[in-house]
Image: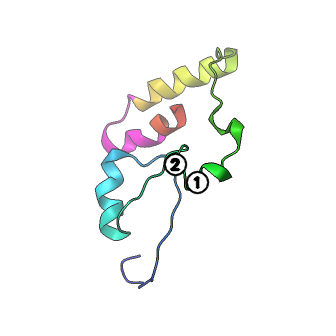
Amino acid sequence: MQKLKFKRKLGFSAFIPYTRRYEIEKYVGEIREWSWSDRKIKPYIPEWIGEVYGAEFNAYEKELYEELTQYAYEFTGKERALPMMAIR
């Protein structure tokens, strides 16, 4: 990205980790964020986009969650990132 010269850059992400924000802005440019309620994009957002609900883990999901948690704490620093992302 640093070596290529573009007129415009566009990337989409549902989540930008706070720890990566500086690096992204350094190499890509200013990060602009929009809310679902932003009047410029609201007409394009379906009504169901914000539906969120809670549900209990089934037995398999609970076992997987516990194993990932245990695995994550065997590492520190960057190595812990992958199992932590899987947990999310």
Q: Residue at x 55, y 44 (%)?
A: 36
User: Is residue 63 shown in magenta?
Assistant: no
**What kind of element bears circle 2?**
loop
Q: Give percent across and percent down for residue 25.
A: 33, 63
Q: Give percent across and percent down for residue 74.
A: 38, 30
Which contiguous range is marked in magenta?
A: 73-82
Q: Which residue is mark 1?
A: 41
Question: Is 40 left or right of 2, judged from the image as shown?
Answer: right
Residue type highlighted by circle 1: Ile
Eyeballing the image, is 8 above or below 78? Answer: below
Q: How is the image coloured?
A: rainbow
Image quarter in which the N terminus is found: bottom left
Tell me the quarter of the picture where residue 32 sits.
bottom left
Q: Which residue is mark 2?
A: 38
54 or 49, nearer to the observer: 49
Tell me if label 2 and label 1 are in contact, CB under 8 Å. Answer: yes
Q: Residue at x 52, y 48 (%)?
A: 38
82 or 17, nearer to the observer: 17
Marks 2 and 1 sit apart, C-alpha to C-alpha, by 6 Å
Q: Give percent across and percent down for residue 27.
A: 34, 69
**What kind of element bears circle 1?**
loop
Q: Residue at x 33, y 54 (%)?
A: 21
Q: Residue at x 66, y 39 (%)?
A: 49
Eyeballing the image, is 31 above or below 27? Answer: above
Label 2 environment density (alpha carbons within 10 Å; few <14, some 14–19, many ≥20): few
